[in-house]
Amino acid sequence: MATDWEQTFRNWSKPSSDDECEKQENAERMVGDAIRAHEPLVNRDIRIISQGSYRNNTNVRQESDVDICVCCMEPFFADYSFADYPESETGNVNSSYTYAQFKNDVQAALEEKFTSGVTRGDKAFDVHANTYRVDADVVPAFAYRLYKKKEYNFLLNVQIPSYIEPPGTKFISDGGAVIVNWPEQHYSNGVQKNKATGGRFKLIVRGLKRLKFYMISKKIQAAEPIASYLIECLMYNVLNSVFTGDSYRQNVQNALVACFTATKTDAECEKWLEVNERKFLFRSTQPWSRQQAHDFIVSAWNLVENGL
């Protein structure tokens, strides 16, 4: 029997159930409680930042876990690559408290709260799920200040150093990899995109994520290497005017056509950005390639168009 793709996408585009949301919120709250209760961290400026598909309301049933960043705001990582002044002009003072110490402190806090329910990974701590909460990936990070050229302060009548706000987050994996993220920019840009498309952006993202998992179940190889985050970024780069009308299937197909055209060559999508608009989507540093995205889009289109 041919798939009714209109109804299928309508079902797939729904957000998490109330029960799933409650368990996700429980996980986030309990991680925050663990950090705030741990004595070595009590007097530090720490923010609990939910991120990923959970924060951005693009998660689907197969992605019910939550991503949580435990971010130390001070000390922080500073980057002066774009600054037109020396570090000394910022007034920043180096701290003896290192990122490695902070990660160990976060581990101790989680183990104190969740006992044996914590596993340390290369990048994050896995706080295991139970009947009360979902699985949580907890990433310890320092705030990341990317300093810009000096800006004129009208009140002080001087040029002063400045950095991108809100700051990003930066962490170092146990294996030595350095990762910078911009969760606040991702969240706010996604909200604006969703408003600009009449709420269609996040609906279509969820629908395509579910389609990816469906393709994997059908052993369509082009879906295997595709990260859900990549799908969200691809849809973010589709023009708002493509998301029109009330047909879920038509919106999905229109978006796939737009992505198909743009990903045929490197030149067409070389300036495409992640949702945070701080990183290019297709560069050698990314864990995916433009060709992988293109192959997925072709396979997804063929599946939906043929009504299988």
Image (cartoon, grey):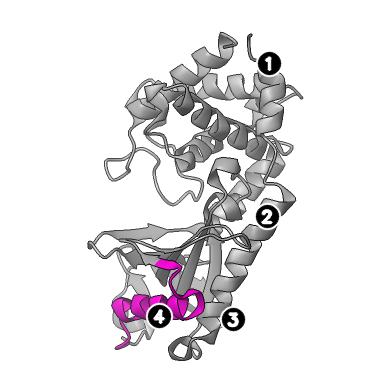
Asked if disc 2 and disc 4 are in contact, CB closer than 8 Å, the reply is: no
Q: Quadrant for the C terminus, please.
A: top right
Between the C-alphas of marks 1 and 3, the distance is 62 Å
Taking the image as shown, residue 125 lies to the left or right of residue 65, namely left
Q: SS of the residue at dot 3?
A: loop
**Amino acid residing under circle 2:** Cys
Indicate which disc residue 155 carries. 3
Asked if disc 4 and disc 1 are in contact, CB closer than 8 Å, the reply is: no
Is residue 157 visible in the rendered image? The answer is no
Q: Which residue is mark 4?
A: 108
**Amino acid residing under circle 3:** Leu
Few, some or many C-alpha atoms within 10 Å of disc 3 (few <14, some 14-19, many ≥20)? Answer: few
Residue at the spot x=34%, y=59% of the render?
179
Residue at the spot x=71%, y=47% of the render?
17
- Please report the bounds of the magenta region as a residue range: 95-118
Between the C-alphas of marks 1 and 2, the distance is 28 Å
Is residue 203 shown above or below 42? above
Indicate which disc residue 21 carries. 2
Few, some or many C-alpha atoms within 10 Å of disc 4 (few <14, some 14-19, many ≥20)? Answer: some
Taking the image as shown, residue 46 lies to the left or right of residue 246, namely left
Q: Position of residue 147 (x, y in %)?
A: 39, 68
Residue mark closest to the camera, 2 vs 3: 2
Residue at the spot x=65%, y=32% of the render?
12
For marks 4 and 1, the one nearer the N-term is 1
For marks 4 and 3, the one nearer the N-term is 4
Q: SS of the residue at dot 2?
A: helix
Indicate which disc residue 4 carries. 1
For marks 2 and 4, the one nearer the N-term is 2
Q: SS of the residue at dot 1?
A: loop
Q: SS of the residue at dot 4?
A: helix
